[in-house]
Amino acid sequence: MKTKTFPLILALLLGLTLTTAAHAQDDDFRRPLRVQTPSGKEPGIADFARAFVSADQKEYALFSATLARIDGRQFKLPQDEQFTCLIDRPHGYLRAVYTIEGIKDPHQVLEVCYWRTDTDRRLVAVCYYNDLGTELLLFYDYSPATGLMTPLAKPPFQDFHEFLRELIVQLPREGKDIHMKRCWDGGPSPLTLRWDGHGTFTLVGAAERYRQPAANQPATCDFIAHFKPEEETSGDPVDLYDAPGGKVIRHLGTYDLDYALRVKRVENGWAHIDYGDDPLMMGPGSSKGSAWVRCTTLYVLPAGHLYENYIYAEPTRAARRVATFNEAMDNITDTWWKVLEIRKGWIKIRTNHLGITGWIETRFLCGSDGVDC
């Protein structure tokens, strides 16, 4: 049988659209699936997993190998490829790992588990992820009366505003809760979805996670900025200060603004910067000096290619989405955005061409941890 590896799904599966198809091939799994069980027996984890991987019409190696393992058959592995599969029947958990040496994301992982609900149905979860993040998270409602696993139209939790592709979803082998961890250095903090025993989950600490940071509070940060859009040859003059609202220690004229900046701290509308000629301001001796400047003298570069990021109406992911980075960049001709305000983890900007105003996360700015521009 000819097989191929599961392709990288480029679109994000976000928040309330976790169960929306990112590619046409996902349609194989987003329909009711028949669960085959021996006569007189309740379905177990192998039966639920078989129903899922059997729906694969593209013959992906991970799914084909998992099906063979469930059915007790041998799966012929190509050279430099490995496969392992754990089927923990007592705990209702399956984990299959397909490894391909020599590629950027060598590990492809499939996890399946289920919970009993108070109506004697089963909530079945299926997760597929690789080294670059979670590609697929689906939930099914299994009915003993019909023998069907029916995909849920919406995920069984609310108040979730994360980019799933930034996270590794860990389905429970023991316990009932779902855990998620970051898959890259600049990713969000880990989170837990707590099982309520009735078929749904609650995001632990949601109120604090999406609380708006207070204005004018001191905060540390670390990202790159300029005094003007990079493509411009001149800009408004800038004064450098020895302290917020303190003494001017240097004046930069209209044509003296070609410095790279690294913003290290903000407080009360002021930013403490290191400045120099190194574009990333990271190497030893790259800084020619430090000073305080008004936040509104800065321009920042968002790393729009990382994820399908958004500009928000308020400094929280729970706020209304104003535009995507790509929309605001106006076909990549408007890449350096004017700073209006900086708070802990967030920065208010105005785009130059379209004049879009809103908040973006500082962790998606060039120069932030894990962001290579």
Image (cartoon, rainbow, N blue to C red):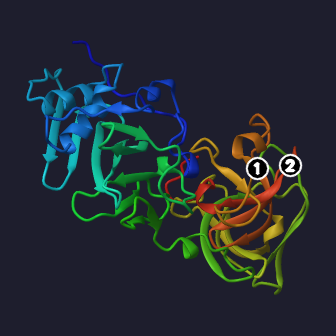
Query: Is disc 1 surrounded by few (<14), some (14 to 19) or many (20+) residues within 10 Å?
Result: many
Residue 111 located left or right of residue 140: left
Q: Quadrant of residue 79?
A: top left
Q: Position of residue 20 (x, y in %)?
A: 54, 38
Q: Position of residue 39 (x, y in %)?
A: 14, 35
- Please determine whether, in this image, residue 233 is positioned above or below residue 105: below
Observer-nearest of 27 and 15: 27
- Which comes before the other along the chain, label 2 or label 1? 1
Observer-nearest of 6 and 29: 29
What residue sits right under mark 1 in the picture?
A: 336
Q: Secondary structure at mark 1?
A: loop
Furthest toward the top, the residue is 1
- Which residue sits at x=26%, y=30%? 62
Task: Please indicate, yes or no, whether residue 6 appears anywhere in the rendered image.
Answer: yes
Tag 2 near tag 1, CB within 8 Å: yes
Observer-nearest of 88 and 44: 44
Q: Secondary structure at mark 2?
A: loop
Real-space CA distance between mark 2 and mark 1, rounded to the nearest whole angstrom: 8 Å
Observer-nearest of 164 and 118: 118
What's the residue type where badge 1 is placed?
A: Trp
- Please determine whether, in this image, residue 114 is positioned above or below residue 96: below
Query: Is disc 2 surrounded by few (<14), some (14 to 19) or many (20+) residues within 10 Å?
Result: some
- Please determine whether, in this image, residue 130 is positioned above or below residue 206: above
Residue 73 located left or right of residue 328: left
What residue sits right under mark 2 in the picture?
A: 352
Residue 181 located left or right of residue 293: left
Q: Position of residue 273 (x, y in %)?
A: 68, 70
Q: Position of residue 301 (x, y in %)?
A: 70, 51
What's the residue type where badge 2 is placed?
A: Asn
